Amino acid sequence: MTASPQVTDDSTTAGWATRQNLLDAAERLIAQHGVAGSSLRKITSDAGTNLAAANYHFGTKEGLVKAVVSRHLGPLNGERLRRLAALEADGDPSLEELVQAFVGPVIRYGLERQDQGRDIAKIFGRAMTQPEDTLRDLLMQEMRPVIHRFSAAFGQALPHLGQQELMWRIFFMIGSMGHTMAGAHMLERVTDGMCNLQDRDGLLKRLQAFLCAGLRAPATLPADSTAAPSSETSP
Amino acid sequence: MTASPQVTDDSTTAGWATRQNLLDAAERLIAQHGVAGSSLRKITSDAGTNLAAANYHFGTKEGLVKAVVSRHLGPLNGERLRRLAALEADGDPSLEELVQAFVGPVIRYGLERQDQGRDIAKIFGRAMTQPEDTLRDLLMQEMRPVIHRFSAAFGQALPHLGQQELMWRIFFMIGSMGHTMAGAHMLERVTDGMCNLQDRDGLLKRLQAFLCAGLRAPATLPADSTAAPSSETSP
DNA sequence: GTTTCATTCGAACGTTCGTTTGAAATCGAG
DNA sequence: CTCGATTTCAAACGAACGTTCGAATGAAAC
């Protein structure tokens, strides 16, 4: 094994053109064909380089895939937490504001960077339910503290829900969000273009309305707010 | 190419033990490791046979995968449509009844057949957003008429929504449902077992409450009920 | 007993995969 | 220019993949 950079850092020196090209090509191909369907040969070919460059910069394919996810997931979750902190600094946030702070960044992420954003959003949306451990574990690990912070805020905004019910609702919310990120292009096709994705503001408004109403729904089971984690209360 | 059965039929003669074993093993492995991560060697090994048997009974790997999905998707959608027809025979169905008719079968499918049902539900939940064409196209093709039928029913139960908004809401609903099927085991892990999946009735009730409230949310945009499919109204 | 057909089996095919190697190229510093 | 470290390249490695082939097996049909 020769000496190789293997750094997780980015945007330091300027001579890392191949590294960026590799990340961009990998991101585009993974979004389109998945991790297993994107061979290193196709990735490096699209990036205008060769196999050894991928090994030199990222060690293994798994390293490349992780780098693709990490370079976007960090800033994304950073913006989420920043928005949440700003809301809480101004008093108790409303449910609409919380949903916007959690869902908004990932939708808006696909607005600013045109295709690149849509690609990474698709990768994120799929990663949660993917069978491969690489993406899923990385996503879960980086999302865990964010979900934990937001869960507390959602709990305050939804005092009528017990802990279990709150967790389920957040899970459903993430499901709608992830499915929208991963497969919205399918809706465009199914509806013969009736639902267009370019209007991200409209998409966010629609998703927000759906999620807030769903989250606000009355509790289905009377009381599980004090339920211990281990107890299985079957009413 | 030798003569091979290649039939899509099932449960005809009794000597098809290997065929069933192959389907069962493939289903379990695909649910756990995905299509790309389940090699024919591992599948046939788990099924207690060899590679050639898979080719003999299903032609190719794609044929096997399609057979795994088809043998469950048909009955599942059949029950959905049967429930919907029964509801409409008794008058205008409520939103709760419609959601139950659409979501209930796939949840209940995992209740009756213990692990097998959970496996196929996981496959279905993932197939919608999967990058591989095989599963996605097959699912879309078989789901299209079902979604079309239910969309009309949902439209009658939600007269305050325009066509676009209705489609988006149904899309969000499918997202929550699919995410629940595909990744509910993750929620169990994230919440340290607080949310258990064995209580499928509770799960269905919670999901139903969330979805109905989300679907019933006020329309976000004033009027798009008469919007033509091609017009891109950007307000 | 012989024939016949469907099914199963071991073994091999060619391809593609991720990874590794060692040399050539590039470039800033002395 | 020279030197040494960094980066790129062509070529090959072994492993795993889906697929195919011809023989062996078994049970019914004649």
Image (cartoon, coloured by chain):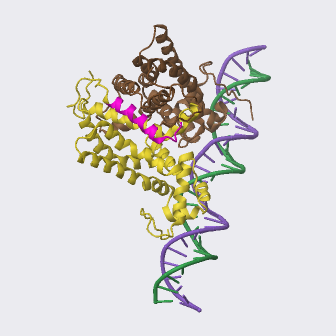
Chain colours: A brown, B yellow, C purple, D green
Q: Which quadrant of the structure image shows residue B100?
A: top left
- Residue at (39%, 50%) from the top-left corner? B76
Position of residue B107 relative to residue C8, above or below, is above
Give the residue furthest to the front: A235
User: Residue B11: image x %, image y %?
Assistant: 44, 65
Q: Residue at x 41, y 51 (%)?
A: B73
Camera-side residue: B97 or A88?
A: B97
Nearer the observer, B198 or A179: B198
Give the percent coordinates (x, y) of residue C1.
Answer: 59, 92
Q: Residue furthest top?
A: A90
Q: Quadrant of the N terminus of chain A?
A: top right
Left or right of B124? Residue B99 is left
Q: Height in image: A31 above or below B34?
A: above
* Residue range of the region highlighted in magenta in the rendering: B196-215
Residue A115: x and y in percent read 43, 29
Whether residue B130 is visible, yes or no, is no
Q: Main secondary structure of the magenta part?
A: helix
Q: Residue at position x 23%, y 48% from top?
A: B89
